[in-house]
């Protein structure tokens, strides 16, 4: 009897963990697909938000340290598929970001909205700094030029998008859409 209960308990935990991993991989694929297709239309002067960084931030809040690094590697590899000339740059930088985000999560309390926004902004800046150093082959002037022209506005855009997503999430979590529908129908 005890062995059967242990097997069932193990099977249930394995199944839940497997489903979580599959869900996260599908989320990564969907986000990268949306970023490469739909968000090309939402650029402002050539600057686009980094949805891949947002999904990595989300996943590191719910995953363990090793999983976060693997998710960073997967996200980076899927981004590298689009630019084979720079194969490995995104994989390395996103893996490093997965590690750094877990480190930040373990060292600091990242519950307040302002801290989350600051972490998002700094994570985008660090990721872009690492990537641009490799992209420009450590050409300092070109790195600074691209960083100021593209990375800084892109980080601000990504942080602003994160702010909107965080507000919508909190609103929906508090029953926002249901409240609006009830008020519209006159039922309170």
Image (spheres, rainbow, N blue to C red):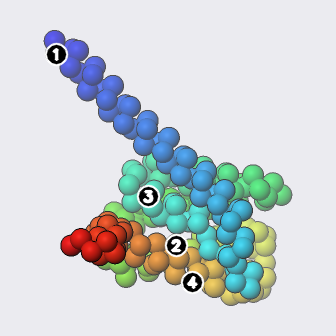
Residue at point 23% right, 21% down? 6
Q: Within 10 Å of the Cα at label 2, are there few (<14), some (14-19), or many (20+) other Cα atoms?
A: many
For marks 4 and 1, the one nearer the N-term is: 1
- Spatial CA distance of label 3 from label 2 is 12 Å
* Residue at figure coordinates x 63%, y 85% from the top left: 153
Q: Position of residue 45 (x, y in %)?
A: 74, 85
- Return the x and y of residue 10 as percentages of the image width and height: 30, 26
Q: Earlier in the sequence, mark 4 or mark 3?
A: 3
- The residue under label 3 is 60
Q: Position of residue 81 (x, y in %)?
A: 75, 52
Alpha carbons under labels 4 and 3: distance apart: 21 Å
Residue picked out by circle 1: 2
| Image position, residue 113 (x, y; %) | 35, 78
Q: Secondary structure at mark 3?
A: helix
Q: Which residue is mark 2?
A: 123
For the question of whether residue 18 can be seen, the reply is: yes
In the displayed structure image, the side of residue 127 where residue 85 appears, left or right: right
Above or below: residue 107 compared with residue 45 = above
**Mark 3 or mark 1, which has the lower sequence index?**
1
Query: Between marks 4 and 1, how big is the CA–CA gap?
Result: 55 Å
**Disc 4 to disc 1: CB gap under 8 Å:** no
- Front position among marks 2 and 4: 4
């Amino acid at each position: 009897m005890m062995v059967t209960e242990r097997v069932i308990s193990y099977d249930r935990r394995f199944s839940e963990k497997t489903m979580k991993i599959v869900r996260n991989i599908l989320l990564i694929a969907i986000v990268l697909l949306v970023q490469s297709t739909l968000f090309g239309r939402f650029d402002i002067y050539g600057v686009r938000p980094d949805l891949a960084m947002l999904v990595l931030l989300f996943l590191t809040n719910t995953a363990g340290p090793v999983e976060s690094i693997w998710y960073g590697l997967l996200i980076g590899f899927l981004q590298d598929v689009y630019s084979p000339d720079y194969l490995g740059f995104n994989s390395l930088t996103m893996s490093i970001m997965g590690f750094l985000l877990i480190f930040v999560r373990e060292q600091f309390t990242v519950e307040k909205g302002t801290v989350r926004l600051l972490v998002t902004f700094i994570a985008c800046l660090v990721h872009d700094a690492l990537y641009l150093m490799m992209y420009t082959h450590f050409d300092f002037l070109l790195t600074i030029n691209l960083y100021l022209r593209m990375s800084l506005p892109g980080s601000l855009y990504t942080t602003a998008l994160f702010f909107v997503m965080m507000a919508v999430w909190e609103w929906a979590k508090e029953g926002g859409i249901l409240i609006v529908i009830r008020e519209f129908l006159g039922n309170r």
